Amino acid sequence: MPTSLPPDAPVLVLAAPGDASGVASEIAAVVRVDNPQIEVRLATVADLADSLPSGRDAVVVPLLTWDDPAVLAEIGKAVAAGGTGAVVTEALGPHPLLAEALHIRLAEKGLARADRVRLLNVSSPVDAVILGTAGGARAVQAVQATAVLLASRLTMPVVAASLDSEPGVSVAAQRLRAAGAERLAIAPCVIGHEMAPGTLEQAAAEIEAGHAEPLGAHGAIAELVARAYGSQLAT
C-alpha cells in the first residue's frame, strides 16, 4: 500500500452484509487509523448503491471470509444500480493472515499454543479444531484451504463444518472423536455479522467444546482489507 495517494484516488467502500454498526464499524475504524491516506466508507449491502462516490472511482471490499455468491450477487446489483465504475474485490479469504488471526483467537481463549513469537504454552490444550463457518455446505467447501493453513500452524487436525446448517459441527465432532480426538475447540471462521447471536455458543455446547471468539476487528482483517484495495490500485 502506498504511503500517500493522490486526492482523486479510489474510495475504499466496505460492504457489510447485514448491520454496518458493531464489528463492521470497528473494522472500518482500524482501516482508517492504519491507512490515513485512504478515504474509507462503510455501507451495508442494501445501502451500497447510495454510498458509492459520484464521478470518482471506488473499490468495494466485501466483509466476508469466503466468496458467498448470494452476497456478491447483491453487491454486484448495487454497484450496477449506482451507475459508477466501482470495482468489487474478492472476499478476504482464504489467506495465511486469516489462519494467523484464527490461531490468535484460539490462543486468547487458551485453546491453542501461542504462536512462536509469544511462546506462552508448551503442550496443546486440545486434540483437534473444528473450523466453523456460516453459509451452509458451500461455505464449508470454500474454507477448506483456510482449514489446511490453520492445521499447518497448529500441527493438529482441523476440520471445516457448518455452524448454521446440517450436517454441522456435531457430525464433525463425532468423526474426530471416533478417530481419537477427545478435546475439541471451535474456531469460527466468521467476522461476526454472518450468523445469528448465540449460534456459536449453542454449537459449542452441543459438542461440549470450547470456542474462540469471531475474528471481529482483528488487525489481520484490516490488513486484508487494505491489501484487497491495494491490489486493485496495482492493476
Image (tube, rainbow, N blue to C red):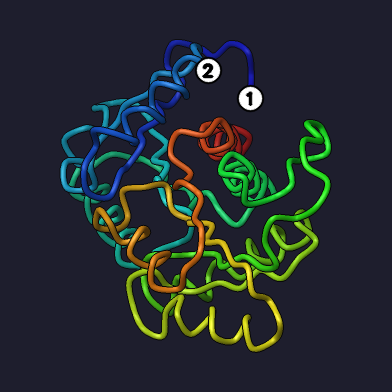
Q: Which residue is mark 1?
A: 1
Instruction: Depth check: give the residue in front, 224 or 211.
Output: 211
Percent position of residue 16, x then y: 30, 44
Q: Residue at x 27, y 56 (%)?
A: 198
Q: Is residue 45 above or below residue 159?
A: above
- For the C terminus, the quadrant is top right
Q: Residues within 10 Å of mark 2 (few under 14, many from 20)?
A: some
- The reply to whether callout 1 and callout 2 are in contact (CB within 8 Å) is yes
Q: Is residue 105 above or below residue 29?
A: below
Q: Residue at x 31, y 48 (%)?
A: 193
Of the two numbered discs 1 and 2 on the same chain, state the one appearing first in sequence.
Answer: 1
Q: Is residue 8 above or below residue 228?
A: above
Q: Residue at x 22, y 49 (%)?
A: 18
Q: Nearer the viewer, mark 1 or mark 2?
A: 2
Given the image, on which type of amino acid does mark 1 rest? Answer: Met
- For the N terminus, the quadrant is top right
Given the image, on which type of amino acid does mark 2 rest? Answer: Asn
Q: Secondary structure at mark 1?
A: loop
Q: Residue at x 43, y 39 (%)?
A: 216
Q: Which residue is mark 2?
A: 35
For residue 83, side relative to residue 36 (left or right): left
Percent position of residue 50, x then y: 16, 35
